[in-house]
Image: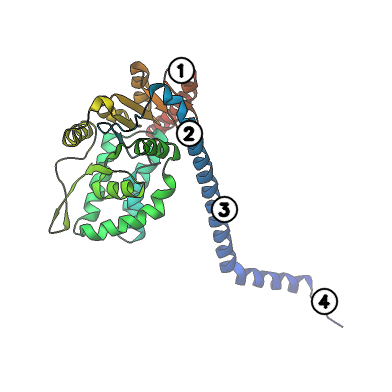
Amino acid sequence: MRSRRSPRHAWSWIASRAGSATARSVLAGEASADAARKQELERQQAEEFQQGVFEAAQADEDEEDGFPVAGDVRAAAFFDLDNTVMQGAALFHFGRGLYKRDFFEKRELARFAWQQAWFRLAGKEDAGHMADVRSSALSIVQGHSVSELTAIGEEIYDEYMAGRIWPGTRALAQAHLDAGQKVWLVTAAPVETATIIARRLGLTGALGTVAESVDGVYTGRLVGEPLHGPAKAEAVRALAAAEDLELERCAAYSDSSNDIPMLSLVGYPYAINPDSRLREHAREMGWRLRDYRTGRKAAKVGIPAAAGVGAVAGGAAAAVAMQRRRR
């Protein structure tokens, strides 16, 4: 006859089993949480893809302008990268990949993380923040070869960037390509990173910030200054002259008021996921708007459909202000 354990002995047995299973329980819990996060990411990506398909299907709304014009070889399109073509900042995603490969310490990753959090919350670039993160990136790559970081950049694109491309913006770029026009990324991100993204998306090429290298090794300095704000406009102007383009026939796309100089150069400026200042300027100028963050789309900024976007931006601005007050 099987003897019964006393309550005291039973509790001791349960406690010992619980203790021996602790490590396995933690592992199981972490694996379950990781799987849940991956499922959520896949769901979000699927929703964004469907949104991109919807945006592409709605492209006939622009046919009243006959744009883009098929076969117009003197027209091209220029796309900002961060928060226009891709969610978040390319430099942050690149930094995540370098951290994973032990290029720098957790303290430096925290700086990149704060930049990304601010960028996503505010929905716009800040020159001071962006200059700080670029300075960090330059110090990290100093002494490494161009070929090494280019190869790593290919891997990082697959790991952190490919799933963050806005399908709607991608459809806009493809419309220009289908019309036989060249499409360029114009970004403050390193030109090597921008070139990888452009090639992976099937675009013509990229204009980006050039980091100095000697004998194929980064020195930790820039050639000139970051391709930001007015510098982007000058790059577009120079490329248009070299390519014999007519800027009045060209299009430019950006989320940031910093790119108003570039947008003002072309005949077809578009505000994509715009910050509040760009939205206001676009309203005054009658520029077209597309916002993929909320799923809303409007042919003109001034029509009522754009009103909901302002509420989202207002909430983000309030959150940023609150964060600043806590400092």
Residue 228 higher or lower than 19, as above or below: above
Q: Which residue is mark 2?
A: 55
* Residue ID at (35%, 33%): 124
Q: Which residue is mark 4?
A: 4
Q: Which residue is mark 1?
A: 303
The C terminus, quarter of image: top left
Neighbourhood count class around disc 4 (C-alpha, 10 Å): few under 14, some 14–19, many 20 upward? few
Sooner in the amino-acid sequence: mark 3 or mark 1: 3
- Name the one closer to the observer, 299 or 8: 299
Label 4–label 2 contact, CB within 8 A: no
Verify CB contact (< 8 Å) between mark 3 and mark 1: no
Q: Quadrant of residue 265?
A: top left
- Nearest the eye: 131 or 307: 307
**Which sits earlier in the primary sequence, circle 4 or circle 2?**
4
Q: Earlier in the sequence, mark 2 or mark 1?
A: 2
Foreground pick, 224 / 70: 70
Mark 1 or mark 4, which is nearer the start of the sequence?
4
Q: Residue at x 40, y 26 (%)?
A: 289
